[in-house]
């Protein structure tokens, strides 16, 4: 996926940190604990607005964040600039493509929080990303990332073309009120692709209304497919969780696919 494609999120980038599922998602402590355990340096792919990156740096971890979206990185930079000197000194932000990158140092841990890996919609792109990670890790370094575990019911029965799942309204610091809805635009079951829209209905303080649309595709990946892909890229799966509480895979359905893999 190119930077331009990812930056379809651009018009809604400044809403991201206030959206209810992202604001309260329980993955922050999970990834910060993994970063603290690794001891750094850590590489985060798809770092976005710094939702994981900044708490990890506050916890004393040296971390590099890579993202292809200039707008999301701009928000992250503004947030980093407001941190104390010792936190800022631990953070490096890089605009780049997660399919092909290199860094001079070797990382002890790479993380891909909240499913940006699924924005890679071909096996070629996925393996290219994993190969870049493998080359960037120190011997014995680890990769931790999460995918959604595909729900067969949702793949087969989710309505196409309907806006649904209205979330609670939230208010931004500048007074804008926002309601977000979801739409499945199309399902390509042969290529395991879902085409989606996130629709933001924005009411400005002066009463003006605006509709912002983030369009994107996600590739759904099944458990054993991901394990085979990791093996092809030179990783050994050490743990697989169904939730950020470290619950065992199979304990809930559909749950998450949260992989901990070691460079072999």
Image (tube, rainbow, N blue to C red):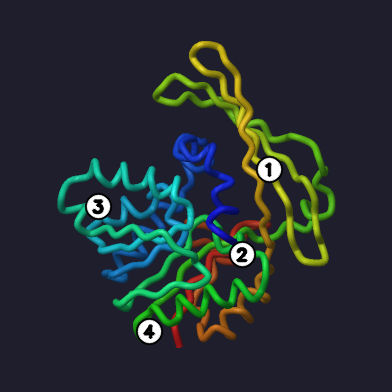
* Rendered view: 74 above or below 92: above
* Secondary element at image label 1: strand
How far apart marks 3 and 2 lie (CA) works out to: 30 Å
- Which quarter of the rendering shows the N terminus? bottom right
Residue 197 marker: 1
How far apart marks 1 and 4 lie (CA) works out to: 39 Å
Residue 120 marker: 2
At 48% from the left and 24% from the top, the residue drawn is 171
81 relative to 217 in the view: left or right: left
Q: Sequence order check: which comes first, mark 3 or mark 2?
A: 3
Q: Sequence order check: which comes first, mark 4 or mark 2?
A: 2
* Secondary element at image label 4: strand
The crowding category of the residue bearing disc 4, from other C-alpha atoms within 10 Å (few below 14, some 14 to 19, many at least 20), is few
Q: Sequence order check: which comes first, mark 1 or mark 4?
A: 4
Query: Between tags 1 and 4, which lies in front?
Result: 1
Q: Position of residue 17 (x, y in %)?
A: 45, 39
């Amino acid at each position: 996926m190119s930077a331009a494609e990812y930056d379809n999120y651009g018009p809604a980038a400044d809403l991201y940190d206030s959206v209810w599922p992202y604001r309260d998602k329980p993955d922050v402590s999970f990834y910060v604990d993994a970063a603290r355990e690794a001891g750094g340096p850590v590489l985060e792919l798809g770092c976005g607005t710094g939702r994981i990156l900044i708490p990890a740096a506050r916890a004393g971890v040296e971390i590099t964040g890579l993202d292809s979206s200039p707008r999301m990185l701009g928000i992250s930079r503004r947030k980093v600039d407001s941190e104390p000197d010792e936190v800022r000194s631990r953070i490096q932000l890089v605009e780049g493509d997660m399919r092909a990158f290199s860094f001079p140092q070797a990382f002890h841990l790479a993380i891909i929080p909240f499913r940006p890996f699924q924005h890679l919609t071909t096996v070629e792109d996925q393996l290219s990303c994993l190969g870049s990670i493998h080359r960037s890790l120190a011997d014995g370094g680890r990769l931790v990332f999460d995918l959604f575990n595909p729900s067969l019911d949702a793949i087969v029965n989710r309505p196409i073309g309907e806006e649904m799942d209205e979330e609670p309204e939230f208010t931004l610091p500048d007074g804008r009120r926002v309601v977000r809805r979801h739409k499945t635009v199309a399902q390509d079951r042969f290529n395991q692709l879902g085409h989606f829209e996130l629709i933001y209905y924005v009411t400005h303080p002066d009463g003006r209304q605006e509709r912002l649309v983030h369009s994107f595709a996600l590739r759904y990946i099944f458990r054993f497919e991901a394990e085979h892909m990791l093996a092809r890229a030179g990783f050994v799966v050490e743990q697989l969780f169904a939730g950020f509480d470290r619950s065992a895979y199979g304990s809930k359905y559909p749950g998450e696919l949260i992989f901990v893999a070691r460079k072999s």
